[in-house]
Amino acid sequence: MQFKKSIVPVLFLLIGFSSFGQTLERPLPLSTRQQYVQAKNYFLLTLMQQSPQVKKMLENDLVFSKIASAKTDSLRQSLLACKNSMCFAEKAKFTDAEITLIGDELLKLYQPKNALGILVNQQLIPSGKYSFYDGLKPENLLQKAWQQDAAGINRVIDVYAEGKKPNYPAIDSISFKVYTNSAADLLYDCSASVLQDCKDTKLFFLPSLIYALRCLEINDRDQAGDFEPMAETVNKQAVGRIKTINWKNYKYTLILVPGAGPEMPEEALSAEGMLRCRIAAHHYLEGMAPFIMVSGGKVHPYKTRFCEAEEMKKYLIKTLLIPENAILMEPHARHTTTNMRNCARLIYQYKIPDNQPFLTSTTKSQSYYITKMAARCLKELHYVPYKTGQRLSDNDQEFYPVKEALQINADEPLDP
C-alpha cells in the first residue's frame, strides 16, 4: 500500500477542525459531533462537499442535478403517499440503478488534472480510508469509494429506520418498534425534516446522506462523534506531550488497555476494567511506555450512558494516580477487534512511531484471545489491523500497527 507521508496527516486534520462544518452549506449547520459522524462514515462525500470546485462540478452536471431533484421529489412524495415506516425509509435510500448511474458519471467526470482528479489523488487515496481498492486506477477507486459510501448510507437506513438487524443486535439495534403507527409518524417527521434541509440542494447525495445522519441521531446512535475533536478535548494534554518524547528511551510507544463493559446499567466501570487498568499502570510506572491508551465506547449494556475509556481514564487518574498527560482515550471501539484497529489509527493520527511496537495489557483470557483473533478480524473488518510481536506474559502481548487499519468499515456506522 502506498502512502504519501506528507499528505496523510493533513487528512486527519481535515476532520479535526472545529470549523469544519462551516464549509458544508445547509440551512441548519451540523454540530461538531455530527460533522465527525458524517466524515468518519462518508469520507468521499464529505470531501466533495468541502471542495468548492468539485461541489460546483457536481451541481452543474446534468445527470447529477436530475438525481438531486429525483431524491428530493421522492421525499416529497413520501409525505403524501407513505403510510408506514418502511415506505418512508425506502424512499430515502439510493436504488441500485442510481448507484450504478452515479458511479458511471463519476468515471466520465474524472480527469487526473481537474478538481475531481486532484481530490482523488491528493486527498482520497492518501487517506487510506478506501485502501481495499488500492490496486485500481484512481478513477476506478473513486467509483468504488462512491459505492462504499452509498452502501453505508443505505445500511444506516436499513438498520435505523427499517429495523433490520445490525451485526450485534444486543448492543446496536434500533430504538423504536418499526411496525407501529408511532414509528410511521416519527419517520414522516424525519422525512419532512430532511426535505426542509435539502429542498433546494443541487448535490445528488445530500438528501440520502442527511436522512442517514438523521436516523442515527433520532436513535441516539451518533457515538462516532463522541469527544471529538479528541486532540483538542480529552487527549489534549497527552497529544501536547507526544512531541516531547524521546522514543528511544522506551521499548513500547504505549500500553493499550481494552475496555470491559459492565453488565448493570448503573455500574460505571467493571471489575475487569479496573484490573486491566492496574496491569497497565504497573507497566507505565516501570517505564515500559510513555503513554497508556484506554479503549472502549458506550457499549454494554444496551444504551449505557457510560463510556468504557472515559471511566478507565478516571480510574487511572483518581485511584492509580497516573497523570492525565500520560493517558490517551480511544472512546469509540465497540469490540475487541476495533480496540486494536482504533489504537493503530490513533498511532498514525498522533504521529506516534509506527515502526516501534505497542503493548496490549489486559486480563489473561482476553490477552490470549487477541492473539487468536485474526480470523474474526478478517470476517468483520476484512483485514487484520495489526502485526503480532512477542508475548511477554499471560497479560502482555506486543503488536505493531498496520496502515490497513485506516480503512472505513461501512458496516458499522457507530464506529466505522
Image (tube, grey):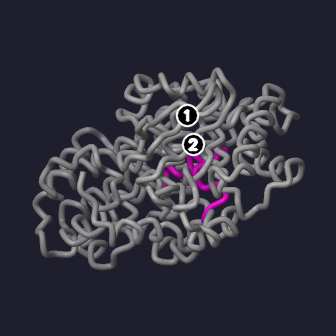
Q: Is residue 2 left or right of residue 288?
A: left
Q: Is residue 71 above or below residue 277?
A: below
* The one of 82 and 357 positioned closer to us in this rendering: 357
Gap in angstroms between the C-alphas marked 2 and 1: 6 Å
Picture coordinates of residue 286, whole percent (x, y): 72, 49
Picture coordinates of residue 88, whole percent (x, y): 49, 40
Picture coordinates of residue 380, whole percent (x, y): 43, 29
Q: How many marks?
A: 2
Q: Is residue 383 left or right of residue 362?
A: left
Q: Amino acid at mark 2?
A: Leu
Q: Is residue 91 visible?
A: no
Q: Is residue 178 left or right of residue 52?
A: right
Q: Amino acid at mark 1?
A: Gln
Q: Are marks 2 and 1 in contact (CB under 8 Å)?
A: yes
* The one of 311 and 164 positioned closer to us in this rendering: 311
Q: Is residue 261 visible?
A: yes
Residue 397 is tagged as 1
Picture coordinates of residue 168, whole percent (x, y): 56, 26
Q: Residue at x 54, y 44 (%)?
A: 415
Residue 359 is tagged as 2
Q: Residues within 10 Å of mark 1 (few under 14, many from 20)?
A: many
Q: Main secondary structure of the magenta part?
A: helix
Residue 335 is tagged as none
Q: Is residue 184 located in the magenta-colored stretch of the structure? A: no
Range of residues picked out in magenta: 210-229
